[in-house]
Image: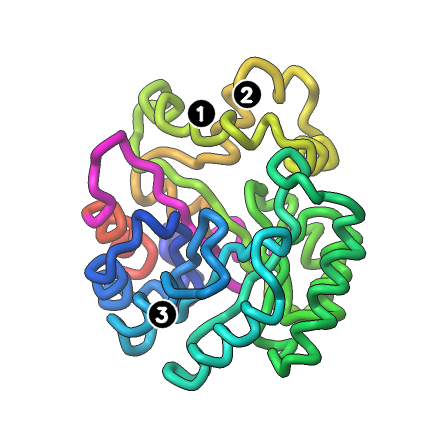
Amino acid sequence: MGANAGVSRGTVGVWRHSDGLPPELAVELERLGYGRIWIGGSPDGSLDSAERLLDATSTIGVATGIVNIWQDDAHKVAASFHRLEERHPGRFLLGVGAGHREHADRYTKPYEALVAYLDVLDAEGVPQDRRVLAALGPRVLRLAADRARGAHPYLVTPEHTRQAREILGKDALLAPEQKVVLEPDPERARAIGRPRVSSPYLGLANYVASLRRLGWSDADLADDGSDALIDALAVHGTSERVAQGVRAHLEAGADEVAVQLLTREGELPDAGFRELAAALWG
C-alpha cells in the first residue's frame, strides 16, 4: 500500500502561526489541495487574520486554532464571526479554548469559563456546528461533542486520536494537529523538532498531563523530551514517511489532520508543502 493510500484532498489541512501566513501562502495551499488553514498563536478576536486569508482565496477553509477565551470577549468574537460569515459563507470555523494556566492571570475554573463562553456564543447566534474546542482530556472532549462541532486537539499522537474518537462518538469533527519535519536524518530532524516541542509545551501542565495519560513516562518528559517522544510528536523522515504519519491519525479516527510543518530557521515552507502534497495525494 502506498503512502498516499486512503488520503484524499481536504482531509489534510495546515496549522501555522498567524505571523507565518501571508495571503500568497494561503493561495498556494489552496492550489495544492489542502482543505483548511488553522491559524495558531491565539489569533485576535477581531479575526482579521482569518479575514485576510479568506479574502485572498476562494475555496479553502479557515479556522482558528484557537481563540483564547481569556483574551477575547465572546461578544466581540461572535460579532467577528458574523462579519466573516456574511463575506465568506460557510468557509470559517471558529476554534476556541481555555489556553494554559501558566499564560493567563485569570485562569480559574477553566471548564466552567468555557461553558459560559459557549453560552454567550449561543446567545449571539454562532451555530454550534461552526465552532470547535481545543480539547485534550475526556471532560472537554465530551463538551466538544455536546456543544460544538467537535475537537481540535494539539500536541497529540494517533493513540490520542483513537481515544478521542471513542469519547466524541462517530459524528463529531476530530481534527488533531501533527508536527512534521521533512528531514530523513534523525539527528537533524530532532534538532528541528525538539525545541518546538520542549518549549513551551513540556512546561505546560495540561500538555504534560495529556502525554502522561497516553503512557509517556517522567523520563520521556524530562530533559527536553526523549527521542521517542520527539519522534512521535514531530514525525520526521522522507515525504512518504511523513505522509504515513499523517495517515495514521486518519486511520485512528480523525476527519482531518492539521499539519504543522517545522523547518529550519529562516527556511520558507512553500517547497515543503508542495513536497508533502505530492506524497499525500500525488
Q: Residue at x 64, y 44 (%)?
A: 159
The residue wearing badge 1 is: 194
Q: Residues within 10 Å of mark 1 (few under 14, many from 20)?
A: some
In the image, taking residue 242 as reference, residue 147 lies left or right, namely right
Q: Which residues are magenta?
A: 247-270
Mark 1 or mark 2, earlier in chain: 1
Determine if the magenta segment contains residue 257: yes
Q: Amino acid at mark 2?
A: Gly
| Vertical relation: 180 (above or below) 95 | above
Q: Answer whether labels 1 and 2 touch (C-beta < 8 Å).
A: yes
Q: Answer whether labels 3 and 1 touch (C-beta < 8 Å).
A: no
How far apart marks 3 and 1 lie (CA) works out to: 32 Å
How far apart marks 1 and 2 lie (CA) works out to: 7 Å
The residue wearing badge 2 is: 225
Q: Toward which corner of the image does residue 147 lie, by quadrant?
A: bottom right
Determine if the magenta segment contains residue 99: no
Residue 6: % across, % down: 44, 62
Q: Could you tell me which quadrant the C terminus lies in?
A: bottom left
Q: Residue at x 21, y 36 (%)?
A: 267
